[in-house]
Amino acid sequence: VVALDNDKASVEACRRNIKFNGSVACSKVESHLADARVYMLTHPNEFDVVDLDPYGAPSVFLDSAVQS
């Protein structure tokens, strides 16, 4: 699982949550401070599934999600 956010506080909260959930989560979940659109376009073969849960309308992410 790749968790992406462009808000530093959200990424830190995600990283704390990963540590809180133990070694299984630590090995399977990674959190990055990044623009999800750019990340998806620069890692085109990394994803089998893209789950968008934006704060607001997801339309700005759809092109990148489909291309990745």
Image (tube, rainbow, N blue to C red):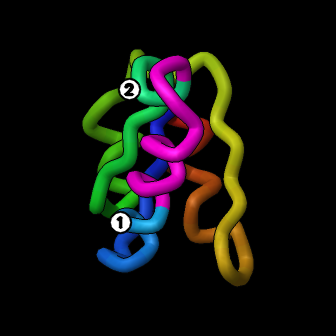
Asked if residue 43 shows in the view, the reply is: yes
Q: Position of residue 24 (x, y in %)?
A: 53, 18
Residue 2 is situated, as x and y percent measured from the top left of the image, at: 46, 37
Under circle 2, the secondary element is loop
**Residue 13 sits above or below residue 9 on the image:** above
Instruction: Please name the amino acid that badge 1 sits on.
Output: Glu
| Residue corresponding to mark 2 | 44
Q: Which residue is mark 1?
A: 12
Percent position (x, y) of residue 6? Answer: 36, 72
Q: Is residue 23 magenta?
A: yes
Measured in 3D between alpha carbons, the distance from the residue under mark 1 to the one under mark 2, in whole angstroms, is: 25 Å
Q: Residue at horizontal 28%, vertical 61%?
A: 33
Q: Return the disc, 1 or 2, that comes first in the chain's sequence.
A: 1
Residue sitting at x 63%, y 54%:
62
Image position of 25 with respect to 63: above or below: above
**What is the quadrant of residue 41 in the picture?**
top left
The amino acid type, in three-letter code, at marker 2 is Pro
Disc on res. 48: none
| Closer to the camera in the image, 21 or 10 | 21
Q: Nearer the viewer, residue 30 or 67?
A: 30
Q: What is the magenta range? A: 14-24
Mark 1 neighbour density, 10 Å: few (under 14) some (14–19) many (20 or more): some
Q: Is residue 59 magenta?
A: no
Residue at the image position 51 percent from the left and 30 percent from the top: 22
Q: Nearer the viewer, mark 1 or mark 2?
A: 1
